[in-house]
Amino acid sequence: MSALLPGAATLGVLGGGQLGRMFVHAAQALGYRCVVLDPDAISPAGAVAEKHVKADYLDSFGLAQLARDCDAITTEFENVPALALETLAGMRVVAPSGASVAVCQDRAVEKAHFEAAGVPCAPHAVISNDIELAAVDPALLPGILKTSRMGYDGKGQVRVATAAELAAAWAGLKRVPCVLEQLLPLKAELSVLVARGADGQLVNFPVQQNLHRGGILAVTEVPARAVPADVQQQAVSAARQVAEALGYVGVLCIEFFWLDDGRLVVNEMAPRPHNSGHWTMNGADVSQFELQVRALAGLPLLAPRQHSASVMLNLLGDLWFSADGGPTPPAWDRVLALPGTHLHLYGKADARHGRKMGHLNITANTPEAAHAVAVQAAALLG
Ligand code: ADP
Ligand code: MG
């Protein structure tokens, strides 16, 4: 395929959330026009795109409209659009492919892919019927039972310690297909973002260290100071291997567990830019969203160069609810007085607990300096 040139082409995205919004911003900066398909009348990406097609992800008229308007189409989330992407692929350039997204939609299929690519993941068993439930190896307990499909931010997961708890938890999850994973002792959680072009060019960002609270990403630090170089190298190689094995086109994020015994295992992957890559908007010379645009448009990919030590703080709606009630926005003027702070808000009108409202990137010359400012920012945010 010849490249879709900036200033001339229109790019589309399935999904109107914050990831779509930041894709649109990056695409528009390069001179592309953008169309967003999202069923909600009000959406963070729909508000900034040149056009918003308000339709369901599987609405054939909506998809046809998107294909008419756009030269190439991507997605900002994995849960619905595999089928939509397959439909669109008959009409337009689509990246990532519906087939790649389908692998990421199902934990059991995803784990099989990791194993086929030669990358170790957590010991696990697939549970989709009573026979599989009865056959579960007791060595997998205590474990985490996860629905194979539709889980995110820790949703659709239950911790279980015994076979009886496992059976009850599976019944509680309405006996949908699940994966039981052994509960692993985590030293840290890491992620690696890669971007791959249709021509096979493959680039990666450095290893990101992630802290989760209540199943939701809270903080990302890059460089991952605490992680030895050989472990980081292993994570980067594994991420590249997974992308190659998929023949992936676009931006892909692979999450890892670094275990107490020093081993590295892969957790899951997302076929799109990722919350843990938001630091790239200020800490690297190319952001994950620009690479998403470049990969989709068939432009050359830039090998990212990190120019600043970075910390990203996720801003959840909880910050809008102080002791005296709320919702009241945090004192941004005070936060932005701190050195190297860069605020990104997603344009969501109403703050709710657990809702991703924005993120704060902190850049500095050294990881220690970035960390110190992050501590001050967190104190101001309350
Ligand atoms: P989600 O799709 O909700 O992000 P994950 O599989 O990434 O689901 O799980 C969410 C979080 O739960 C992980 O980031 C990690 O903190 C914890 N977790 C998940 N699986 C395991 C495991 N096998 N052992 C220990 N902790 C786990
Ligand atoms: Mg996860």
Image (cartoon, rainbow, N blue to C red):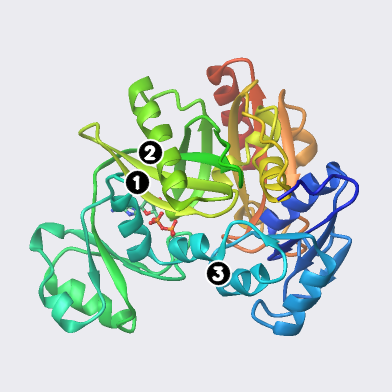
Mark 3 lies on residue: 82
Residue density around tag 1, few if under 14, some if 14–19, many if 20 or more, within 10 Å: many
Task: Name, please, the residue furthest toward the top.
Answer: 365
Q: In the image, is residue 150 above or below residue 228?
A: below
Q: Position of residue 208 (x, y in %)?
A: 49, 34
How many angstroms separate mark 1 from mark 3 (CA)? 22 Å
Q: Amino acid at mark 3?
A: Ala
* Residue 190 shows up from this direction: no
* Residue 138 shows up from this direction: yes
Name the residue at 31% across, 81% down.
172
Q: Earlier in the sequence, mark 1 or mark 3?
A: 3
Corner quadrant of residue 377? top right
Q: Amino acid at mark 1?
A: Val
Secondary structure category for the residue under label 3: helix
Mark 1 lies on residue: 266
Q: Earlier in the sequence, mark 2 or mark 1?
A: 2
Q: Nearer the viewer, mark 1 or mark 3?
A: 3
Query: Could you tell me which quadrant the C terminus lies in?
Result: top right
Q: Residue 80 bears which disc, if any?
A: none
Q: Earlier in the sequence, mark 3 or mark 2?
A: 3
Corner quadrant of residue 185? top left
**Disc 2 to disc 1: CB gap under 8 Å:** yes
Name the residue at 50% across, 54% down.
270
Q: Tell me if 357 is positioned left or right of 222 in this view.
A: right
Mark 2 lies on residue: 238
Q: Position of residue 365 (x, y in %)?
A: 63, 15
Name the residue at 37% across, 26% down.
227
Name the residue at 58% across, 31% down.
311
